[in-house]
Amino acid sequence: MESPVRYEIREDGIAVVTFDLPGEKVNKLTSQVMESFSEVINEISGNQAVQAIIITSAKPGVFIAGADIREIEGIRDPKAGEELAHKGQLILDRLESLPFPVIAAIDGVCLGGGMELALACHYRVISDDPKTVLGQPEVKLGIIPGFGGTQRLPRLVGIQKGMEMILTGKNIYPKKALKIGLADDMAPKEILMEAAVQFAGKVMGPDWRRPQGMHRKRDLLETLLETTSAGRKFLFKQARVQTMKESRGHYPAPLKALEAMEQGMLLGMQHGLTIEAGFLGETAVTQVSKNLIRVFYLQEEFKKDPGVVHPGVTPLPVRKAGMVGAGVMGGGIAELFAEKEIPVRMKDIHPNAVAGGLGAAYKVLSKKKAKRIISQTEMDRKFGMISGTTDYTGFRHADLVVEAVLEKMDVKKQVLRETEEKTSPQTIFATNTSSLSVTQLAGASARPDKVVGMHFFNPVDKMPLVEVIRGEQTSDETVATIVALSKKLGKTPIVVRDGEGFLVNRILMPYLNEGALLLEEGVDIRTVDRLMLEFGMPMGVFILLDQIGLDVALKVAGILHDAYGERMRPSVILPKMVEAGRLGRKNGKGFYAYKGKESAVSPETISLISGVRKGGPPLLEKEISGRLILTMINEAAMILSQGIADRPSVVDAGMIFGTGFPPFHGGLLRYADHLGLEKIRTDLEGFAKRFGDRFKAADLIVDMAEKKECFYPVI
Ligand code: NAD
């Protein structure tokens, strides 16, 4: 088999080492690749003619994407993980101790193990291409960097910047990489190799000394904090407190990474590496890591999924878009188009709303500029892609129109008819409705095959999910177009069949409603919210309701009640709150009262709830959590058996990427498998007897429990 790492020695004494994993689009550091690399280092180091090495990749858009995730997933014994890390560390140690300069020439993705390999090089020359990203995303897989990242990174970019990269796993873009000293030089990708050779020419020779520590100057504060033992102690303590606050103890890897970094800074690099390898082994075998890896596979699954079963359906190009409704969602959606440089015309009935939508898009772009993800010129060009209007001028040539007007069927039908008059017969009409039936809306259309749901989540720039809703008459071509476009816009699309609330809101709303029903029985707001935070939800039930807006929640709850009957009857608390003018965060008054960033359960809410309290038997905390979580699992089972989602992974992707369902549980139905269908059925039956028929177990759950089945194959 062809070797994944090859090299050539140039006449000027520079050895060019190229990573090129046969048969793959990306380079990964499998054990076998590391072995080949090790052999290459041996051969080169024995060659007297070599005076410098440049390490590069033959894959377009990828330097090295990271370790082999399948290999990490396969680790069952901490010792095996430790050994794997230790072997990799030894190879990178040898690379670092070569007696001549080693330069990584990085174009494209350089993550995880790839980043660690680049860190073991003496210098990094990077391309300024937008595809070039550097980072240590290991914590996202529940592990820590194991090839020296926790040791070399803080030494190169400083403790604070190193911590930030390792604890958040965030990508670093080229300009920032240069600024923080992660890269030494930058060039356009077309001339990256020339730039690397030139760089080598400057540093190589008999006087070359291995660079030590940071390649940039620290400022005064950084010096005080990072070079004194008191400063370092303070930094690590702060980071630990912050990490515990953010992860609530659910994720072990960040704390382990911090410990490896701190011990390494205290006791020296070699000691740090030993600790790092041990912790890699420890974290790799945790259930949290296995679940996070499954979430990674989920992402990959939906990246590849074309959204239609029939092969050969070609998505249509979307070169120009129209946006109707410039409110909270419209402005955000328009920004996504602009970001990808698809010209978008945004219409609202109110000129002020158009200005608001433009302002919102500008704000998101400005944030990207502030983070150095885009330059001022790029920002100006992208913002120039959005234009505003109060009529339909400029819609004629739109390939797609997205509507995000009021959540009212008659208004949406009116907008659809107007749009069809002003656009071409080929134009796709996508609705951003959160709950209304796409098929019903398409009833007003002269071309229902071109009507589809494209449900974004709020805030649009942050939430990764797009729910693509297939109406009864929506064509494959339309679905495939929206799926391909959603991916282009940087989102993860799932395709679901039509039905009120679709997938995400149909599962989420009964859960939120159950929270309110618990209040009717006398449970207090803080207890419910605390229990859900402890379960790992990104926020409590009532904080989320306040964020959604209680009027909006009530409207959606009503639509679901009409569609699905008694089991979705809204709690009386929701209309009471809305009648009392408590709409949530948007007017500072919801279940909580908001003042700036502060929130506290409002006394008014408490008295309002006590007015409708029915009371009930005291509940154990596990019963409270159980009612909330099983409500979601039960609804998800109905969604599956009704074919709204065609497989469990659609439910899990929807809930993780659309609501932030805790990734460390692996997904809602993964969690159901973990509980066991038999237990779920028994608990639901118990709840149904005590609290009402809404807990009646879905047929699918009863059936699966009897057959001792799981949602996912047992590996
Ligand atoms: P919004 O009230 O902020 O914005 C609606 C905008 O539509 C307003 O600016 C209004 O002036 C405009 N409008 C009303 N009638 C119009 C017409 N005939 N032509 C053009 N513009 C018109 O509402 P939003 O929160 O952006 O929600 C819009 C849609 O998105 C709704 O269907 C909602 O269910 C859905 N949605 C909202 C969220 C959310 O969290 N806000 C999330 C997902 C989906």
Image (cartoon, rainbow, N blue to C red):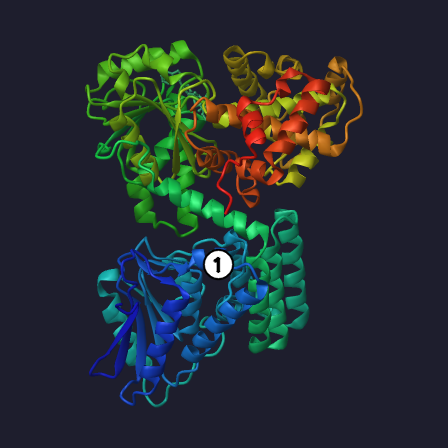
Residue 101 visible within the image:
no
**Quadrant showing the N terminus:** bottom left
**Residue at left offset 47%, top offset 21%:** 501
Q: Is 632 left or right of 622, judged from the image as shown?
A: left
Locate residue 140, reporting x and y percent.
Answer: 51, 52
Which of the two residues, 26 or 84, is positioned nearer the viewer here? 84
Find the residue positioned furthest to the front. 707
Which of the two residues, 661 or 158, is positioned nearer the viewer here? 661
Is residue 268 positioned above or below 46 on the image?
above
Locate residue 373, reporting x and y percent.
Answer: 38, 50
Image quadrant where residue 442 sits? top left
The amino acid type found where label 1 is placed reads Ile
Image quadrant where residue 575 sits? top right
Is residue 68 positioned above or below 584 on the image?
below
Which of the two residues, 367 or 143, is positioned nearer the viewer here? 143
Q: Total number of numbered labels?
A: 1
Q: Determine whether the residue tagged by mark 1 lies in a helix, strand or loop.
A: helix
Would you call the spot at circle 1 few (<14 residues within 10 Å), some (14-19), or many (20 or more)?
many
Locate residue 84, reporting x and y percent.
Answer: 49, 68
Is residue 68 positioned above or below 83 on the image?
above
Q: Is 356 left or right of 416, judged from the image as shown?
A: right
Residue 187 visible within the image:
yes
Find the residue positioned furthest to the right. 618
**Residue at left offset 60%, top offset 76%:** 271
Locate residue 33, reporting x and y percent.
Answer: 36, 68
**Residue at left offset 52%, top offset 48%:** 292
Which of the two residues, 350 or 267, is positioned nearer the viewer here? 267
Q: Quadrant of ligand 1?
A: top left
Image quadrant where residue 382 sits? top left
Residue pointed to by mark 1:
72
The answer to whether the beta carbon of the residue marked 1 is less than 8 Å from any atom of ligand 1 is: no
**Residue at left offset 58%, top offset 22%:** 510
